[in-house]
Image: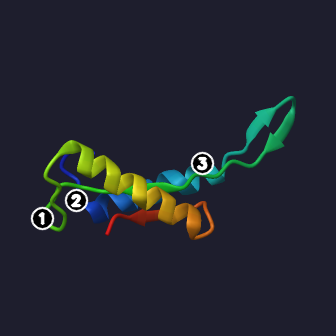
Amino acid sequence: MPGADAKQAAVIAEKLRKRVAATPMLVHQVEVPVTVSIGVAANDRTMKFPAPDALINAADKAVYAAKHAGRNCTRIAA
């Protein structure tokens, strides 16, 4: 999300998470609930990562934090 800081990206991610949770998949004519866990990291004034790999790793850790928090949630990288 070019131009978004971590908090703005998390707001958008949370809207996406809620939309996914509200839209079940149709599998063999059966509605199946779907959820997502989202990790957010940003190179903005609050977070600075020296390389793209560091940014991706931070987002990945935030995804795992969301999963450990019970899944179906959004977490911002520390």
In the rendered view, would you say 16 is above or below 76?
above
Q: Which kind of residue does numbered mark 3 sit on?
A: Val
Of the two numbered discs 3 and 2 on the same chain, state the one appearing first in sequence: 2
Q: Quadrant of residue 4?
A: bottom left
Residue 27: x and y, percent?
81, 32
Residue 5 badge: 2
Could you tell me which residue is drawn at 60 percent across and 48 percent down? Answer: 20
Q: Which kind of residue does numbered mark 2 sit on?
A: Asp
Q: Which kind of residue does numbered mark 1 sit on?
A: Arg
Residue 65: x and y, percent?
49, 65
* Residues marked 3 and 2 touching at CB (< 8 Å): no
Q: CA distance from mark 3 to mark 2?
A: 23 Å
54 horizontally vs 32: left or right: left
Q: Residues within 10 Å of mark 2 (few under 14, many from 20)?
A: some
Which residue is most to the top? 28
Of the two numbered discs 1 and 2 on the same chain, state the one appearing first in sequence: 2
Residue 11: x and y, percent?
38, 62
35 horizontally vs 41: left or right: right
Residue 73 visible somewhere in the drawing: no
Residue carrying label 1 = 45
> Helix, strand or loop at disc 3?
helix
> Helix, strand or loop at disc 2?
loop
* Residues marked 1 and 2 touching at CB (< 8 Å): yes
48 horizontally vs 39: left or right: left
Residue carrying label 3 = 20
Residue 37: x and y, percent?
54, 55
Task: Report the front residue among 52 and 73.
Answer: 52
